Amino acid sequence: MQAEAYSNVRNNLKSFMKKVNDDADAIIITSRDGESNSVLLSQDEYDNLIENAYIRSSKANVNHIMKSWEQLKSGKGKEHNWE
């Protein structure tokens, strides 16, 4: 993750937007005071973070996922054709 000064991002916003989308990486936008830094990331990355936070917010969901993962690792997984 790279850090860029606010003024540089402001002057080159389009290229930084392209970079975060192409590279699936975030850019830290630094402020002069160092206390109000922000992060620029693609909408896909943001949506993924929000979805994961939501899924992990439920202990029941996490337990179900972990149980399913253990079943798959022990060879109890089943292949499905959803078409």
Image (spheres, helix red, strand yellow):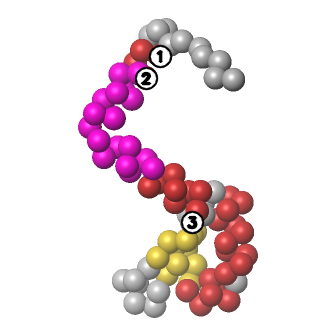
Q: Quadrant of the C terminus?
A: top right
In the foreground, 36 or 21: 21
Residue at x-position 36% and y-position 83%: 35
Residue at x-position 44% and y-position 79%: 37
Please identify the residue farthest to the left as the structure is shown. Answer: 59
For the residues labelled 2 and 3, the Cα–Cα distance comes to: 29 Å
- Identify the amino acid type marked 3: Leu
Q: Which residue does the numbered mark 1 point to in the structure image?
A: 72
Q: Which residue does the numbered mark 3 point to in the structure image?
A: 41
In the foreground, 9 or 33: 9
Magenta residues (range): 51-68
Residue at x-position 38% and y-position 50%: 53
Where disc 1 sits, the SS reads helix
For the residues labelled 1 and 3, the Cα–Cα distance comes to: 33 Å
Label 3: how many Cα within 10 Å (few below 14, some 14–19, many 20+): many
Where disc 2 sits, the SS reads helix
Is 63 within the magenta?
yes
Q: Residue 69's mark?
A: 2
Label 2: how many Cα within 10 Å (few below 14, some 14–19, many 20+): few
Where disc 3 sits, the SS reads loop
Residue 69: image location, x then y, percent: 43, 23
Labels 2 & 1 near each other (Cβ < 8 A): yes
Residue at x-position 47% and y-position 16%: 72
